[in-house]
Amino acid sequence: MRFEIVRGWLPGAIGGIVALHGEYYHRKAGFGLYFETKVARELAEFACRHDDARDGLWLAVSDGRVEGSIVIDGIDARGEGAHLRWFIVSDRLRGRGAGKALIGAALDFCRARGYRDCHLWTFAGLDAARHLYERNGFRLTRQARGAQWGVEVDEQRFDLRLEA
């Protein structure tokens, strides 16, 4: 299946990203309404304050449909570091290089902006994503039981020190 990486918002992208997250994480981890509304609310808040100078959104698009996403939230990039968020690839594109392309675009953006650090939150058991994170230099820095997504899981924080 062919895809392209598109930088920025497209009509329907916000709903598509929320749907991808809601469906995948319900199947994978039993996340429910709390999680899906959290993604929708926080993604909408991000979109409303989005600033092209510090933030980035990339979409994997196939046949006009959003099949993946990644965000760099740079609001605290000079403090805690850039926050990599809402990284997901649909079942249709998983294993076809879309995840690698999305992470590459996001990290290239961070380096171009001179961000020194990037971090993300995830949870144990997402092995394919973890492999991509670690291949790109992210290291696990924290792990603890938590329920920030509405279901108790082993939450993990990964950090990356970026070269300028």
Image: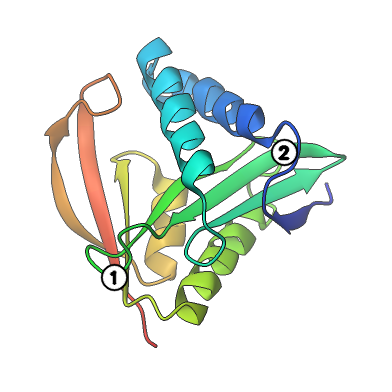
The spot of residue 44 in percent (x, y) is 50, 33
Q: Is residue 115 left or right of residue 9?
A: left
Q: Which mark is residue 107?
A: none
Give the crowd class for mark 2: few <14, some 14-19, many >=20 residues within 10 Å.
many
Q: Residue at image x 37%, y 64%?
A: 134
Which residue position holds label 1? 78
The spot of residue 9 in percent (x, y) is 68, 46
SS at badge 1: loop
Identify which residue, 6 or 143, lies in the foreground: 6
Q: Earlier in the sequence, mark 2 or mark 1?
A: 2
Amino acid type of the residue tagged 1 in the rendering: Arg
Considering only vertical position in the picture, is 19 above or below 82? Answer: above
Amino acid type of the residue tagged 2 in the rendering: Val
CA gap between label 2 and label 1 equals: 30 Å
Considering only vertical position in the picture, is 151 above or below 56? Answer: above
**In which quadrant will I find the C terminus?**
bottom left
Q: Which mark is residue 66?
A: 2
The residue at the far top in this view is 33
Instruction: Say if mark 2 contacts mark 1, CB within 8 Å.
Output: no
Q: Residue at image x 68%, y 36%?
A: 13
Q: Residue at image x 48%, y 36%?
A: 43
Residue 88's quadrant in the figure? top right
The residue at the far left in this view is 144
Considering only vertical position in the picture, is 3 above or below 150? Answer: below
Q: Is residue 100 left or right of residue 86?
A: right
Mark 2 or 1: the one toward you: 1
Q: Is residue 146 left or right of residue 32?
A: left
Identify which residue, 103 or 111, lies in the foreground: 111
The spot of residue 114 in percent (x, y) is 41, 81
SS at badge 2: strand
Residue 146's quadrant in the figure? top left
The spot of residue 82 in percent (x, y) is 36, 62
